[in-house]
Amino acid sequence: MFKLIYSVGGQISEYLRSNLSSADWQLIASDDAGFADAAVRERADFLLIQAAAAPSFYRRELMRLYLTGCSPHIILFSMGRDSRFSSSFKPEQASAQFTRAENELYRVLFQAILQESVSITGGMQFLRCSDIQMRASRFTREEQLKEIISGVSLEQFREITEEYNLNIVSPAGHYLVISKAMPYNYFDDYTHNRRVYRMLEELLRDELYVLLNRYAGGEVFSISNNSVCIIINDFRQPSAKKYREQINTLLSQIYQLMDDGMTALFVGRHVNSPTEFNVVYRECINAKRMRIFYGEEQLLSVKTLRQKREVPAAEELERCISTIREFSLITPFTEFESAIEELFLRLLKSSASINYYYYSCSAINVVYDAFCHRYGVTPERRAMSRCFDKYVTVEEIAEHYLRIFKNARAQAEANSGRDNLLIYRMTAYVEDNYALDLSLEGLAEFVGFSPSYTSRFFHRHTGKTFSAYLTECRIGRAKELLSQKERPVIAEIAAAVGYRNPQFFSRTFRRLVGCSPSEYTARYRPPRNEKKSP
């Protein structure tokens, strides 16, 4: 038996209940407000929707449905002057029983739609969303509109608008609005439900044109797979106050139509001449990157986004990133959390520096990749790419990093096992603090064991005593320092690796390395940069 959640008109609803076999179907009525919850709750096989609300509402609800992991076969249709129909693609592994049920549902639905249409209008024109002729005509218009915003002369502008009957001739000038929505590749189910999303785009486009024509007209066209450009013909009002009220009302209505919870609108400055379209368009495109610093605001003017703020000192930024780079299995997560929040919520948000933002994200990604590689953790590549594709805020980015690092650490701890994790904490503690006055008692206090048990546990898992491991860490670091400096001061090197007595350091160095620090320096001294004679 297949479960069908349906949100349709009364006559169509009655026809479905009367003509779908009760032996094969469980029919569950819903409405626009509840169809997504009902589909999740009932684990529906089919979801039938008659579009009656704003297209952005359905996009939001389908996204919510997708995030729950529920993926019913969706059928969406609208009825009106130009009715439309779309559906999910059939699953690749669809059973014969599923195919029969799908065919039966389509047959009954089309009969119900035709009956209602004939009874209301006496006839019906039913248009497919993917109508080739309609798409070809729109594509041609969009190409000409793209040419206009890429930069044309006044003469070229007149020729294009006249030849293609574009509704963007306005002596008062224009406004340019650019939308930034979720990219299609954000959705795993976009390919499966591509026809549904395209139909919603068509319905949204129609509603935008209706809205623009209530004022002074304009044009709507796609500029990428997730961005739309709206050219608004400006209009004159008797007073500046009335004019501003009208413009703000129109922009607010555009936003309400397009608000699916994932779309931001960027309003460019006034376009006084068609030759300025390209400049204003580029300003909008460049300003889109700044959206991350403006919280949940969805309708933003380019003028606001381009305002300069005080940039934090590079040293302050590096201090936060250095703390993040130290992330490991023994790092208190509260320290990491504080560094992330200070970086994103204080430094980056207050400065609105897009360059610092990209630099910080790149540095953190390297830390995350290195941690996952070291502990055999599978990185959340999908989640990370989605996070940056989505039009997010700095708050969401901070939450994203805290979540993936927390998950990676939990997985690393599970992979390591208790003993391996504990010995890692011990060795990491020694490697991070070798320059201090370390002792076995201090290590025991760090892990919560007695000194004697700590000594036995450490030796059993590393094959070395605590003191031998500490000495190796110190001498290893001393070798690095000696080979990096041309004339190192032995006393300074000794102090840098935790030895208060330079003589004791030299004896220990000779015992482990086979030569004195001075001899080691002479052997591995970096070459001088000698000037070439003319």
Image: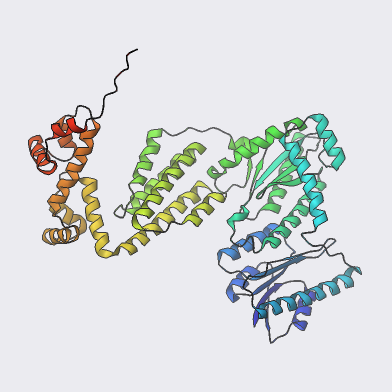
**Quick one: which residue is furthest to the right in this view?**
122
Quarter of the figure that contains the C terminus: top left
**Quick one: which residue is furthest to the bottom in this view?**
23
Q: Is residue 31 above or below residue 186?
A: below
Residue 506 visible, this orientation:
yes
Residue placed most toward the observer, 207 or 430: 430
- Residue at 75%, 46% in the rendered image: 220
Task: Indicate the colouring scheme.
Answer: rainbow
Left or right of residue 8: residue 303 = left
Residue 206 screen position, x and y as percent:
78, 54
Quarter of the figure that contains the N terminus: bottom right
Left or right of residue 315: residue 424 = left
- Residue at 55%, 44% in the rendered image: 294
Residue 249 visible, this orientation:
no
Left or right of residue 178: residue 510 = left
- Residue at 60%, 76% in the rendered image: 42
Asked which quadrant contains residue 33, the reply is bottom right
Residue placed most toward the observer, 446 or 189: 189
Asked which quadrant contains residue 465, the reply is bottom left
Residue 225 screen position, x and y as percent:
66, 50
**Quick one: which residue is furthest to the front in this view?**
534
Residue placed most toward the observer, 247 or 494: 494
Residue 181 screen position, x and y as percent:
63, 50
Residue placed most toward the observer, 410 or 251: 410
The mark tally for this picture is 0
Residue 371 screen position, x and y as percent:
36, 52
Q: Is residue 231 above or below residue 523?
A: below
Q: Is residue 532 above or below residue 522?
A: above
